[in-house]
Image (spheres, rainbow, N blue to C red):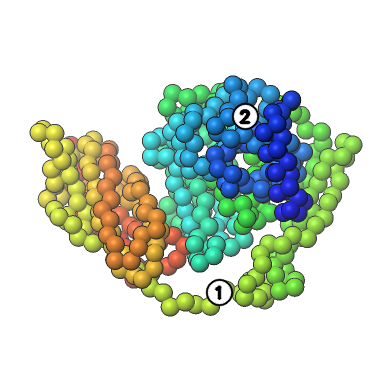
Amino acid sequence: MTKKEVILLTFVFSILLAATFVSAADVAYIYKKDFKIDDNIIGTFMEKGLSVELINEKYLPANFDDYKLIFIGDERFRKELPVTQYPTIITNYHNMYNYGLTDRDGVSQLGSTAPLSVTINGESYQVYTQAFKKRRISNPYYFLDKENKAPSLETIASTVTTSSGYKFGDVIAYAQAGAQLENNKTAQENICFYGIIETDFWTPKAKELFKDCIDFVLERQQEPECNCPNTTISEPFCQDNNLYQTQTNYSCECDECEPHVSTILIEECEFGCEYEQCLPEPTLEELHDIALINLTDAVNNIQIKFYNEEQVWEPVLGNELQCNTEYKLTIKVENKGNSTENITFIGSIGEIVFNHNPIDNFAPTKTSTKWKKVLFDLTPGTYNLTIVAFLNGVTDDNPEDNTVVREVSVVC
């Protein structure tokens, strides 16, 4: 199906919605703003034989009993959506505590200088065809941090383990009907969280995983007609100075699996294609440099405060901390480069891992102070409290000032 066909069908759906439907479609696609409607998502539903109805948040029906599933896109919705009551697919950064999938810390996101991959059963699979959009803005995906997600969620695809050994969380996760969620919620039907949100850059594997997500939320409603092979993908190859793959899909027709072979454009190579890959953009003279800097009452650039008996946050100037006590950990970051940056943070002490909130569009020369409350649930001993700042989508030209370490002694 071409892009024009998908756009035309989207327009038809909108016209039908305005005229009031006589009968509901298979998918209730909830949106807030017209330009946020994702034609690639609609096209994938249609490939699965599902009809789609676009429903503006302003005009939600009294119930969704007539639909097979609900799709919630990447927008901040104001109204309460019945995520736990119906089969639902969520590709969203917001409201996850309200939906019961995370605690109040919500969803995280990750970018990289290379096309992002996910880990499934110990194997790594690339899910984006390229690392950047225009102007070297990274293509991120969302994930449910293992410290924040509801324990009942089943990991389907996780972030690739970093060089430091950290495993961040779930890029794709399922909640079975009956699962106990956060915020005293219970999943009454199957729910899929799908964090690979940049659909214009999906690899065939990413699209396959989204189709698996559809099958999961519908599995209580339908029985498979036949057991077809999985989609097969060829190795990438250069053709007409762009990058392509051959994809073989199988469909169940008259209780038999029929193959369908197509050549798929993976990436339009702006700077040419050689050796089965797009040539990189010429190097620009840019300086990417962030640093964790000193702040008042800090030791080794980390400020630690505790809530004293006068109900005031008081700084800890020594190295002795009490176990099972909540401390406020504050850092200060400065953009010393000449480029606007997106920054994420990772902190750890012992087996405790925590994340300060990320910073988006951090301009040159700017500074920002970030704090995080952490419960020191540790056995007595000496520990290194470590906090690291990461640039999303680019490499820091001076990484030595991105890490701060403060030695502390935990007593009980």
Q: Which quadrant holds residue 256? A: top right
Which residue type carries mark 2? Pro
Task: Return the x and y of residue 340 as percentages of the image width and height.
Answer: 39, 64
Residue at image coords 25%, 56%: 332
Residue at image coords 62%, 47%: 38
> Which residue is at the front of the view, 77 or 48?
77
> Which residue is at the front of the view, 54 or 69?
54
Tell me the tag on residue 281. 1
Task: Return the x and y of residue 374 as percentages of the image width and height.
Answer: 28, 41
Helix, strand or loop at label 2? It is loop
Residue at image coords 58%, 28%: 60
| The C terminus lies in quadrant | top left
> Which residue is at the front of the view, 237 or 25?
25
Neighbour tally class for label 1: few under 14, some 14-19, many 20 plus, Cα within 10 Å: few
Q: What residue did someone put label 2 on?
A: 87
Position of 394 relative to 380 (above/below) = below
Task: Return the x and y of residue 77 as percentages of the image width and height.
Answer: 49, 36
**Does residue 301 appear to the left or right of 211 in the view shown?**
left
Q: Label 2, label 1: how many angstroms apart (C-alpha)?
A: 43 Å
Q: Which quadrant holds residue 72? A: top right
Neighbour tally class for label 2: few under 14, some 14-19, many 20 plus, Cα within 10 Å: many
**Does residue 394 appear to the left or right of 326 in the view shown?**
right
**Does residue 125 appear to the left or right of 137 in the view shown?**
right
Residue at image coords 51%, 54%: 140
Disc 2 or 1, which lies upstream in sequence? 2
